[in-house]
Amino acid sequence: MAREKGTKYVAQNKKARHDYSIEDVFEAGIALTGTEVKALRAGRASLVDGFAMINDGEVWLHNVHIPEYSQGTWTNHAPRRIRKLLLHKTEIAKLIKETKEGGLTIVPLSLYFKNGYAKVEIALARGKKNYDKRASMAERDSKRDIAREMGRRLKGRDT
């Protein structure tokens, strides 16, 4: 059987980009059991309440929901178990430094398969206040309106 090529997204955490301002992004491998991989290949996962913590020099992913595999037996996994993230030592050292000094948190942004391997994209993020969220929504809306108007002008439909 041929190995998979390319990237296949399983889950994305859109709420994280709304609630946090993203400082830095890392790609990490994730240690999974067999039934977790099969459930992910079926395209089922949720990153909504997920976060990562550093414990004894290792990064652990908490509250990520991968539902039980439907055809699994007694070997099925717990849906919200703590999973180990696989990162280089220099990346872990940077995460430790930033979370202790900068008051940042580590949130998962997306879960995907890259060339057959399960990966998670994590980010160092700073929580946004409500007024920051409103400002970013207003900025996004104004950019959309400007792009729409530019498209109309390029097509020759002046209004």
Image (cartoon, rainbow, N blue to C red):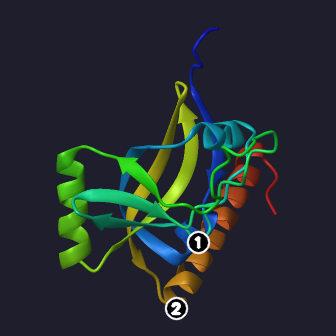
**Of the pair 74 and 27, the residue shown nearer to us:** 74
Q: In which quarter of the image is the N terminus?
A: top right
**Of the pair 46 and 26, the residue shown nearer to us:** 46
Mark 1 crowdedness (10 Å alpha carbons): few <14, some 14-19, many ≥20: some
Asked whether the residues under the numbered discs 1 and 2 touch, taking CB atoms below 8 Å apart as contact, a structural biologist would say: no
Write down the quadrant of residue 135 in the picture: bottom right
Type of residue at label 2?
Tyr
Type of residue at label 1?
Asp
Residue 127 screen position, x and y as percent: 43, 80
**Of the pair 158 and 103, the residue shown nearer to us:** 103
Residue on which the image places disc 1: 49
3D distance between C-alphas at marks 1 and 2: 22 Å
Residue 112 screen position, x and y as percent: 57, 41
Q: Is mark 2 on a helix, strand or loop?
A: helix
Residue 1 as seen in the image, left or right of residue 28: right
For the point 21% across and 65% down, which residue is it?
Answer: 96
Q: Quadrant of the C terminus?
A: bottom right
